[in-house]
Each structure stands twice: as C-alpha cells, then as structure tokens.
Amino acid sequence: MQDRDGKTLRCLMLAADKYPPFRVDVAVLFGREMVARGHTFDWVLQSEEACERSYRTVWSGGRVWVGRTDSGATLLSRLRKHAYDLLHDLKMFRLARARRYDLIQVKDKFASALLAALAARLSRARFIYWLSYPFPEAWLYYAKEGTARYPALYLLRGRVSRWVLYRVIMRLADHVFVQSEQMRDDVAAMGVDRDKLTAVPMGISLEDFPQPAAAVKNRGAEAARKVVYLGTLVRRRRIDFLIRVMAKVLDVVPQARLQLVGGGDGPSDEEFIREEARRLGVEHAVTITGFLPRDQALKSIEEADLCLSPFRPTPILNSASPTKLVEYMAMAKPVVANDHPEQRLVLAESGGGISVPYQEEAFAQAIVTLLNDPEGAADMGRRGRRYVEQWRTYARLAALVEKEYLRVCAR
C-alpha cells in the first residue's frame, strides 16, 4: 500500500532484538504489515545464535546485516557481546551514506541511538526512536531490589542510560514511539515533548488467530475447569501469587485446575512455585508445562475456561502493554487481570474480562464468578475478540505507525 501521494519509504532499522527477530512487534508489525504497505526495511542486528563472523542476508524483502556475538555467560563474555554489537552498529554510517534512507530508527538501544542521530543528520534522514520497555528504570529497580546479577553494574548502567535517554536521545529524535499510553505519560513527565510521542501497544495478527469456536460445551459438575496463565515464571514476577489464589478457588470450585504455560530462567524458578503448591497442598491442581512451541501454547489457551494476566504492581511494569492479554482476547477467552493501567483500560473498553486489585481474594472471587457462569464468561470472550479485531490487529497498528512516519518525513 501507498499513501495518497504514492510515497513509500526506505528505512534503516537497528534494534536490541536479535536475528532472526521473533517478537511480534518486529516480525509482524514491520516484517509483514509495513512491508505489505510498500515500504522497504533494511536491518542491522546481532545474531541470536553463536556467530564468529558478520554476514549479510535477506529477511522480509529487505537486507539484514547480521553481526557476530559471544554466547558465553560470564561477565567478560557479556561485555564482549555488547562491544561486538556496538561495533557492528557502526555500519549504519556507510549504509546511510550509500543507500539514502528516509529514516533511521533505533529500538531499545542507547549508545547506538546517539550514533544514529548523527548518521541521520549527516544523511538527511529522520531519526526515530522506539522504546518498548523502561530499561533504565528496570536496571535501577533490579539493582535496588537485589535481583540483578551484577548490582553495581546495573546501578551504573541505569543511571547513565536514564540521563542519556531522556535528556539527549529523545530530544534529538524527530519522533518517539512508546509501548503504552502510561509510558507516554511517564516519558512526557521526564520533560520530553508529548507531541512527539506516539503509543503503539502490543497487538496480534488475525492470520495467527482465526475465529475461535464460540460455543461453550455444557459439562458435568465434576468436570475439570481449566484456568491458564501464559508467560514467564521468573521469580521476580512472583507467580507464586497465583498458587495462593488457586488455593482459595479450590475451596469453592474443587474441580478447578491451574496450568502455567511457560518457564523461568532456570529450574529454581519453577521449583519455587512447586514448593508453594506443596506447602498449600494444591500440587494436584497445578501443572507447569515449561516453555512450549507457540502452537502448543495457543492450544492450551484454546482449551481454557478462562485466562489470567497478573502483573505485580511495580513502577517498571505499570507502563507495559501485555501481549498475553490481547492473545487471550483474540482467542475469545474471558480474562481475569489486575488493575494495571493498560489492562484496566482494555478490559473496561472491551468488556472482555474482569479487572481487580492485585489481591489474592479479589483474584479468587473473580475466577470463581467466571467458572460458575460459563455463559457469561463466553459472552465476555466474544466481546474481547470483537475488540481485538477492531483495535489491536497489527494491520491497524501499522496504519498508525505509517501515518506518523509519513508525517515526520514530510516536514
């Protein structure tokens, strides 16, 4: 597709995402939807797999310059990996000079963003920055909370990157994309011009989520009621919260079953959850699948009576745009979520679930309400699906991004 003046764009993209990109906000939004609109995207990315030498390949109609990496787990290896990445990103100067891009966009990088601002000015391109997560605040939080692997390094990294991000990068940027309206408010509060900020929340591709069956089968009173959580089980997310919630649910609906679809950073994360289930005597009602292929994970959601989206209230998670929420809704599943800013907004607008305080009793009561009212729950699921179809497809989000790109490049 093209705009009314037939304008298509040539874009150079640098991102913290590795090659090949798998996150839907890159692989689908840019790799599929924006390309379908006639725009060309070249990429400078670091390899996800072990790679000794840089190379060039093709992805989604554009060229990709893939950089070497160090896959080691030591601090030295991590520092070497970052150094390789930064050196690889210097290719942007040669590429910008030779290929004459309309815009250069950097996602979730800091030193490279400073260089990209210069490369854009030298090549007369527009400089766009994309922030998907409040990384500086997260690094500072992990350092103070004591969960960072290298606390002193995280503390230094957080302080420096926060100053560079808000005082330099975003002021140099011609436009900034953020993950949610809450993040837009947070960034504006740091002194960045609100008019140059656009929120692009997480979405889905309808091609990946065909219309689900709407009917709910009537089951016997003793049939299991399946409750599903899809996501990370890392300890800092405190998913043991859901074990205590389920203990309360089982007092009322003994046939309820919780399936946790995902894994942690290591076996200790999952064992922490199992230990809580054993302590409360509910291990018979809790299953941890570990990481599953996407089709199997979605199959678990398809079989669920309802789905859960808890976000432990912290400053760094308040600005998130939960992918799991829209995926649940795309599959016409009713959702119980805590009143996190975006979740509260989406569920209020859609009627696709229940938003409650982050409290065990409140979560348990909402789950019991939906399990005891399957027809009402199914109606919530249908409303959620309609909302996603109207507002949260990547085709719609691509139109929003394209509009801002064209507006900025036309200035």
Image: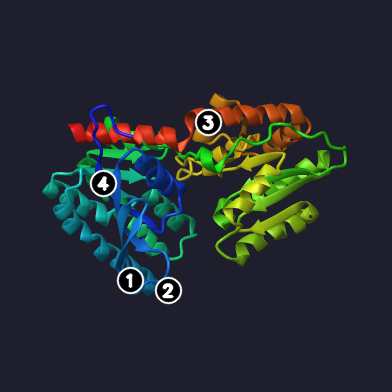
Label ID, residue 389? 3
Q: Amino acid at mark 1?
A: Arg
Neighbor class of circle 1 (other Cα within 10 Å; few <14, some 14-19, many 20+) is some
Q: How many marks?
A: 4
Residue at image mark 1: 80
Q: Residues within 10 Å of mark 4 (few under 14, many from 20)?
A: many
The percent position of residue 232, horizontal first and vertical second, equals: 57, 53
**Do the residues bearing badges 4 and 1 touch, measured as CB atoms within 8 Å?**
no
Query: Which residue type carries mark 2?
Result: Gly
Q: Earlier in the sequence, mark 1 or mark 2?
A: 2
Label 4 residue SS: strand
Q: Residue at x 76, y 31 (%)?
A: 374
Q: Position of residue 178 (x, y in %)?
A: 37, 40
Rounded to the nearest angstrom, the CA distance separating label 4 from label 1 is: 28 Å
Screen quadrant of the C terminus: top left
Under circle 2, the secondary element is loop
Q: Are marks 1 and 2 in contact (CB under 8 Å)?
A: yes
Numbered disc 3: secondary structure: helix
In the picture, residue 1 is in which quadrant?
A: top left
Q: Amino acid at mark 3?
A: Glu
Going from N to C along the chain, the mark reached first, 4 or 2, is: 4
Q: Dot 2 corresponds to which residue?
A: 72
Q: Residue at x 54, y 34 (%)?
A: 343
- Picture disc at residue 11: 4
Q: CA distance from mark 3 to mark 4?
A: 28 Å
Q: Nearer the viewer, mark 4 or mark 2?
A: 4
